[in-house]
Amino acid sequence: MAVGPLLLDPAVAALDHDLGVLPAGRDLAGHVAGPDTGCGLGREVAEDTIEFGDVTETHQQSTFGAHFVEAAVDAATGEIRVRRMLSVCAAGRILNPKAARSQVIGAMTMGVGAALMEELAVDKRHGFFVNHDLASYEVPVHADIPHQDMIFLDEVDPYSSPMKAKGVAELGICGVAAAVANAVHNATGVRVRHYPITLDKLLDRLPEVA
């Protein structure tokens, strides 16, 4: 790994060396900087190497999450309403709980959209995206999203980093759509394997209303 160039400003020459400030033309070890760059600043280049250990081969450092969804399906129309959602996540030490929670519940909302609404229509004859705006590409709104709960398990990962934290990233969305599909199956007995779960995939397969 090459590090540089390091530019040394002559203006810091009068500052105390013990404060960790580079004096003009020299580094903290006292080495004279390289040739002048032509703009009054010295130039120094340092080189080193970095090697990766075998921690990824000896330890599993993934984040883990489980998603739970309760859904209601209208017996006559097949309309789906998500009633409750819960996500339980293990992502190492959570450094910013509020931001991490917002990340997860936002992803849970996206998962509902993927499961029930979002479908891109493509005109394959002309290579045209038919529903290319938010007027026709449907995404969840406030009325579509119920109360959301999420829990971060109290854990640390001593191998991930000195902070013992891991990334939340897309932990909150992976598995949400599947949880919605499972809830719909539990309510209706109909297993839909292609998103989004729209009325046309349910109506002719719904059980008869007694």
Image (cartoon, rainbow, N blue to C red):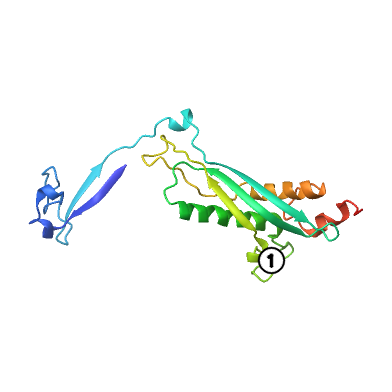
Relative horizontal placement of residue 106, taking residue 140 as reference (left or right): left
Residue 74 lies in quadrant:
bottom right
**Residue 21 or residue 25, whichever sits in front:** 21
Q: Say which residue appears at 33% left-offset and 37% top-offset.
A: 50
What's under tag 1, amino acid-wise?
Phe
Q: Residues within 10 Å of mark 1 (few under 14, many from 20)?
A: few
- Residue 30 placed where, x, y %? 10, 44
Relative horizontal placement of residue 51, taking residue 30 as reference (left or right): right
**Residue 105 or residue 149, whichever sits in front:** 149
- Residue 11 placed where, x, y %? 12, 60
Relative horizontal placement of residue 206, taking residue 173 as reference (left or right): right
Q: Residue 187, relative to residue 126: is it above or below? A: above
Kindly give the residue lying farthest to the bottom in the view shown: 135
The answer to whether residue 97 is seen in the rendering is yes
Question: In the rendered picture of this protein, how many numbered marks are placed on residues?
Answer: 1
Quadrant housing the N terminus: top left
Q: Say which residue appears at 14% left-offset and 60% top-offset.
A: 40
Kindly give the residue lying farthest to the top in the view shown: 58
Q: Say which residue appears at 36% left-offset and 34% top-offset.
A: 51
The answer to whether residue 172 is seen in the rendering is no
Q: Residue 86, relative to residue 135: is it above or below? A: above
- Residue 196 placed where, x, y %? 72, 56
**Residue 104 or residue 204, whichever sits in front:** 104
Describe the element under mark 1 as helix, strand or loop.
strand
**Residue 62 or residue 128, whichever sits in front:** 62
Relative horizontal placement of residue 132, taking residue 152 as reference (left or right): right
Residue 209 lies in quadrant:
bottom right
Q: Name the residue under label 1.
A: 128
Q: Say which residue appears at 78% left-offset and 60% top-offset.
A: 79
- Residue 13 placed where, x, y %? 9, 56
